[in-house]
Image (cartoon, helix red, strand yellow):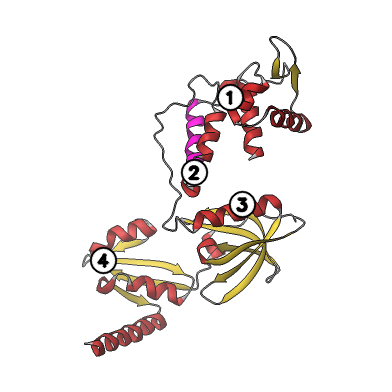
Amino acid sequence: MKMERLIGILSILLQREKVTAPELAEQFEVSRRTIQRDIESLCRAGIPISTTQGAGGGISIMEGYRVDRTVLTAPEMQAILAGLRSLDSVSGTRRYAQLMEKLSAGTGGLVSGGAHMLIDLSSWYKTTLPPKIELIQGAIEQHRTIHFTYFSPKEESVRTIEPYYLVFHWSTWYVWGWCQMREDFRLFKLNRMTELAAGEPFPPRCAPLPNLEPERIFPPKYQVTVLFDPTCRWRLVEEYGADRFTVEPDGRLCFTGGFPDADSVLSWVLTFGGKAELLEPEELRQQLGDLTATLADRYRGGN
């Protein structure tokens, strides 16, 4: 992409006194004419670049505007590399790793091969998720709407939105955009989308950053109290932390927490089988009793 190439060229110019157009063309696998257009774009963006012809000539940033290469330390460059590698784990390519190699050109070993942080953002949906991310990313850059069928706990609907941000949160990918149906900004989970397609161009509006506080996205409706068998400690610690439950005199674990809807409570408690007892609220305790009775009748009948 052009933006990635511009960042790479600028980084090389900041790290080296002078570089030639053929060198840049070979580095980024483009033509010399493309490099010339990129240099013109950087100049229009306010970067003071000078070019000289002939022997010893080349492209450089004007004296007095150069950033010392030590502005980025080795740990900082390693952190950037880890972030770029994490994006490759989503797309299944080496696009961002290659960008990092270009960014680190001329740094004299500032980025070593001994990275000790790996971030993998890939999911179980490796065949369906990357194409969605690529399509949405292109739509955001080109200011085009996207259309899709969306499946939520409340309904199945066809949506058209103006996409503004791809968001990775709660171990899941979302898109944040202006929903034409709701006439407001909404967060949509990519795994709930089907028949995704790019639509018509739209004039971009001022888009606020999404408020990703759990209480904002999933406002708690039920405060629940659940008793767990001691063997469930590892799951409670993993999912909610060690400070969300207390140990009862008999060794059982008393958990309290908020949930956005009844289905979330019931389905979560059922995943523990007979090792969990829902105490409060009473209405959900009754619903869980009715549900387990129905399941017992169904499977007895199957025998």
Residue at horizontal 62 percent and vertical 22 percent from the top: 23
Of residues 56 and 46, the one nearer the viewer is 56
Image: 222 above or below 80: below
Q: Nearer the viewer, mark 3 or mark 2?
A: 2
Of residues 283 and 70, the one nearer the viewer is 70
Q: Residues within 10 Å of mark 4 (few under 14, many from 20)?
A: few
Question: Left or right of 51: which side holds 135?
Answer: left
In space, the residues marked 1 and 4 are separated at their CA atoms by 54 Å
Residue at horizontal 62 percent and vertical 37 percent from the top: 4
Residue 252 image offset from top left, x and y in percent: 25, 67
Question: Quick one: label 1 or label 2, which is nearer the N terminus?
Answer: 1
Question: Quick one: label 3 or label 2, which is nearer the N terminus?
Answer: 2
Residue at horizontal 34 percent and vertical 76 percent from the top: 279
Question: Left or right of 90: which side holds 266?
Answer: left
Amino acid bearing label 1: Val
Magenta stretch: give its range.
74-87
In space, the residues marked 3 and 4 are separated at their CA atoms by 50 Å
